[in-house]
Image: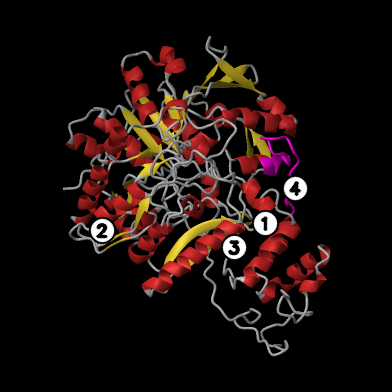
Amino acid sequence: MDRFLVTEPSEMQERGWAELDFVLISGDAYVDHPSFAPAVIGRYLESKGYRVGIIAQPDWNDVSAFKKLGKPRLASLVTAGNLDSMLNKFTAAKKVRREDDYSPGGESGHRPDRATLVYANRMKEAFNDVPLIIGGIEASLRRFAHYDYWSDTVRRSILVDSKADVLVYGMGELQIAELADAFDKGQFKESLPFIRGICYMSKDIPMLEYVECPSFESVKADKMAFADAFRIQYDEQDPFYGQTVVQKHGDRYLIQNTPALPLTQEQMDSVYNLPYTRKWHPKYDDKGGVPALSEVQFSLVSHRGCFGSCSFCAITNHQGRIIQNRSHESLIDEAHTMINMDNFKGYIHDVGGPTANFRHLACDKQAVFGACKGRTCAAPEPCENLNTNHDDYIALLRKLRKLKGVKKVFVRSGLRYDYVLADNNKDFVRELCEFHVSGQLKVAPEHVSKRVTTMMGKAGKEEFLLFKSWFEEANQKLGKKQYLVPYFMSSHPGCSLEDAIELAEFLRDHHMYPEQVQDFIPTPGSLSTCMYYTGINPLDGKPVYVAKKGRDKAKQRALMQFKNVENYDLVKEALIEANRRDLIGFGPKCLIPPRSIGRNNERHSGQRSSGGRFNHKKKSNVKKRDGATGRKSNSSGQNTRTGAKRKSR
């Protein structure tokens, strides 16, 4: 019989428990699967002998909903869930999303805006004398004073506004176990300066080595101070050389202890081998369950961390640049668990992480010295010390696809094609295409302008086109019709109208016609968000152009869909503004005709509009990422393209 974590008082009685050690409040519906952070933290504490209960998506207007499981003996835990609650609710245009994949039946409206703050305040109201710990992606990436896109303001650390006792940043298992032991021994306050991966408030700075960044008051008043603060924080997010970072808020100091050490392979295995049911709680059956589970229920998280260092991604500030992987044995054991489930149909949907083919450390030096400060591993050019070998990953895939009961093993996490090119490994591409692509392979060039891809921390268009040729060559030899699905982004900091036109011309020349496109979303914690708010690259202090006005962003977005009739006026305005009238006309290189052609007025030199588009010959293989920048699906349960790919702890 499936045994979930406690969610009701009756379940406590069945287990003979008079009280819980921890009550965890979650903004997500309760899904007992290792891609869902509340389940991982709850199961990890349970494995250490603690009694844990979950209250998922409580009614935030009713304090009694937070008292349902009684007063916890040690502490209350609060998380907004796998996504920042504001990103979960609002689009790049600040419009309310119609669906919430982390709620029963995909219904929206089951969590408040700024859920961490609301839940924390309610728990303090319910049990003011119980220590309160906040964590998860929302708390982690808002731990310092930060820019909030949805209110267009600089906000204080979420720790200050929540009035919590501790903020856990990063993935959290080691920190929560240390905190639990400190609570249990009555040594909580004196332990705070010595627990890695946490933040707390203090009247005084502890007598340790530290670096102080500009205060909240300074960064709110001065964008250069904001950029300086971000650079200091960014430089210290390494567990080997990172120092304690201090930021003053009023008359108190926010203390960020050094990051938690990477999990060893044994620790990673233990986390993912906990007794998850891999199901949503049965109380959601009547609503059809929780949609977010469908993509990951039969997927395997092979590793954490990412050394790609994309500027718009917050993985560096959450999971870190150091890869932490699982053993083949652990992954095979988990695959056997999936095979034995009644609804398993023989397909493993994904084997990967934030980036599918980053299975090991970027280089041997990282194991001792950490990731290099001031340098990136992969882009715009790969480091000479980068270990690009794919043997371990392909060996893992081979083992999995040979398991009895497995029909197919797919790779659906984002693939870093520049890393494959650096390995000069056509054999990997051939084997990937033969066995592990389900008709389409996701890749993320994001843009083609060298200026923009450099600002993004991505490889250039030459690398994308070379990998595209490898992919097409492999499929031709295999006799398969498979396609690349490239993701492109508009309005990223540094992207001018001229850059957007360059991307439109690239799409025209390569017969790529996106059905949907994605604007950059400035989410807390990313380098790109700092550039968006300040207009400054904090790493070199140079100014950065940012398209902030709605009309400017709309023109960049429209250029990516220049064939759509409804975009005609915006595209024409953009081309005239950029002095590119040469792209208006009937020639083969023109993006639009001289006048708009509607569905009922199709006179265009032999071309006809179809479905609201100017005629084109090839169907698009460019699709929208899952929901928004920051919602790209992968097996890791991590939301790395927000700054944080889909679901992050």
* Image-quadrant location for residue 195: top left
Q: Is residue 541 magenta?
A: yes
The first of marks 3 and 4 along the sequence is 3
Please name the residue that numbered disc 2 is placed on: 401
Please name the residue that numbered disc 3 is placed on: 517
Cα distance in 3D space between marks 3 and 2 = 34 Å
Cα distance in 3D space between marks 1 and 4 = 14 Å
The first of marks 3 and 2 along the sequence is 2
Identify which amino acid the numbered label 3 is placed on: Val
Identify which amino acid the numbered label 4 is placed on: Tyr
The first of marks 4 and 2 along the sequence is 2
The first of marks 1 and 2 along the sequence is 2
Q: Are marks 4 and 2 in contact (CB under 8 Å)?
A: no
Cα distance in 3D space between marks 4 and 2 = 48 Å
Number of the label disc, if any, that sits on residue 449: 1
The first of marks 3 and 1 along the sequence is 1
In the image, residue 319 above or below residue 483: above
